[in-house]
Image (cartoon, grey):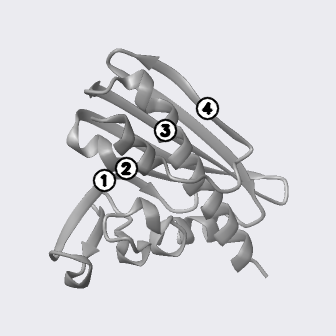
Amino acid sequence: MRISKLFIWAGVAIAAPAHSAVTATSEIGFATESSVEIAAAPGAIYALLVKPGLWWNDSHSYSGNAANMTIDPRAGGCFCEMIPAKTGPEGTVEHARVIYAQPGRLLRLSGALGPLQTEGVAATLDFVLAPAGQGTKVTLTYVVGGYVRGGSAEMAPLVDQVLAEQLAALKKAAESATP
């Protein structure tokens, strides 16, 4: 995969979460972790989390509009996106598959996101919600294993940046919705 394509996927980050890091890299994969405290209850955050069209960045969607993204929050459910004909050829894309859903506590997805979808990898994305003070700590981890043509170590910081951006957007949306 060409580096220029990776930078396009990385985009411009918005307010960073409290913690974001590549926690491991090797020739066969990498892991990232981001966390943030959100001034909202775990149940409210989970309800928003499963509606990515309300918080995911449009520039990190295939259709250019995150409103076309949905998550069916049950085991086997799809984190999918409709691609309307007005944006080019009509179609759909599966970003990931739900493998564990526990409302207010955990959402686990299996899938290679963005440019990783064209690589020979398997990946697991976790959103863990835990009460913290007056709100909730949300920890996002993404573990990727397999073959990445451009190299896992080169891809890891870009993926970390994009996921940290999504977590910051979730925080912003959740706190904007909180009375």
- 98 or 116: nearer the viewer: 116
Q: Which residue is mark 2?
A: 109
**Disc 2 to disc 3, C-alpha distance:** 19 Å
**Disc 1 to disc 3, C-alpha distance:** 19 Å
Q: Residue at x 47, y 29 (%)?
A: 31
Tell me, yes or no, if residue 107 can be seen here: yes
Percent of width and height locating residue 67: 42, 78
From the image, state whether disc 1 or disc 3 is nearer to you: 3
At label 3, the amino acid type is: Leu
Q: Residue at x 35, y 44 (%)?
A: 5
In the shown orientation, is residue 7 left or right of residue 21? left
Q: Is residue 90 above or below residue 17?
A: below
Q: Which residue is mark 3?
A: 158
In the shown orientation, is residue 60 left or right of residue 130? left
Circles 2 and 1 in contact, beta carbons < 8 Å = yes
In the shown orientation, is residue 169 left or right of residue 118? right
Lower position in the chain sequence, tag 2 or tag 1 = 1
Q: Residue furthest right?
A: 133
From the image, state whether disc 4 or disc 1 is nearer to you: 4
Lower position in the chain sequence, tag 1 or tag 3 = 1
Q: Residues within 10 Å of mark 1 (few under 14, many from 20)?
A: many
**Disc 4 to disc 3, C-alpha distance:** 11 Å
**Disc 4 to disc 1, C-alpha distance:** 22 Å
At label 4, the amino acid type is: Ala
**Disc 2 to disc 1, C-alpha distance:** 6 Å
Q: Residue at x 34, y 50 (%)?
A: 114
Q: Which residue is mark 4?
A: 21
> Which of the 4 image quarters holds residue 89?
bottom left
Q: Is residue 103 above or below residue 123?
A: below
Q: Quadrant of the C terminus?
A: bottom right
Lower position in the chain sequence, tag 2 or tag 3 = 2
Instruction: Assign a secondary structure to mark 2.
Output: strand
